[in-house]
Each structure stands twice: as structure tokens, then as C-alpha cells.
Amino acid sequence: MNAAPSLADCVAALEARRRALCEEMHDYGTPVPACDADFNAMVAERAEISAALTRLAPLARGEVHVPHPREDH
């Protein structure tokens, strides 16, 4: 059985996807504002990934303690 991915693995995967999206958007032709569904979808996905990375940052830096269900609080 494979172990679940670590938080660092998840953050690295999100960062890699964000970089790939940025490269794809850079290479994309000039979009027509509000009319280019593919480009708009990439912008939305990049925003979601950036927001997720922002929310995960304190946890990834060890600034937040997530108690184990069996720990005393």
C-alpha cells in the first residue's frame, strides 16, 4: 500500500501546476478579454491554486499545530 502524500508533496505539486499554468499562459496567444474561455479557465485555476498555497503556507512552515485526534487538547 502506498503512503499518503506528505504536505510538502502536495505543496510541491500545487507549485509545479501553478508554474506550468504561468508558462502556458505566457505562451498563449493574445486573448480576447472576457471571450476566451480556455484562457479564463487558466486564470481561474491559477487563482485557486495561489489561494490554496496561501492557506497552506503557515501549515507548511510549521506555524500551525494540527492536533492528532487522539491527542489531549
Image: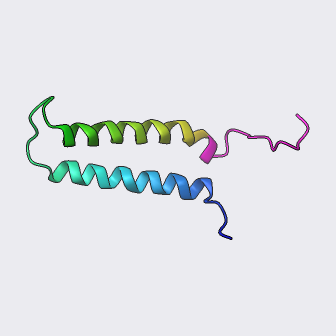
Residue furthest right as drawn? 72
Query: In the image, is 55 to the left or to the right of 36?
Result: right
61 within the magenta span: yes
Looking at the image, is 62 positioned above or below residue 13? Answer: above
Residue located at (34% from left, 42% from top): 46
Residue located at (64% from left, 60% from top): 4
Q: Position of residue 41 (x, y in %)?
A: 27, 39
22 within the magenta span: no
Quarter of the image where the N terminus is located: bottom right
Q: Quadrant of residue 59?
A: top right
Dominant secondary structure of the residues highlighted in magenta in the image: loop
Residue located at (61% from left, 46% from top): 61
Quarter of the image where the C terminus is located: top right
How many labels, in total?
Answer: 0
Which of the two residues, 70 or 61, is positioned nearer the viewer here? 70
Residue furthest top as drawn? 34
Colour option used: rainbow
Residue located at (47% from left, 56% from top): 13
Which of the two residues, 2 or 9, is positioned nearer the viewer here? 2
Q: Position of residue 25 (x, y in %)?
A: 21, 48
Looking at the image, is 40 positioned above or below residue 1? Answer: above
Residue furthest bottom as drawn? 1
Q: Position of residue 60 (x, y in %)?
A: 60, 47
Start-end of magenta stretch: 59-73
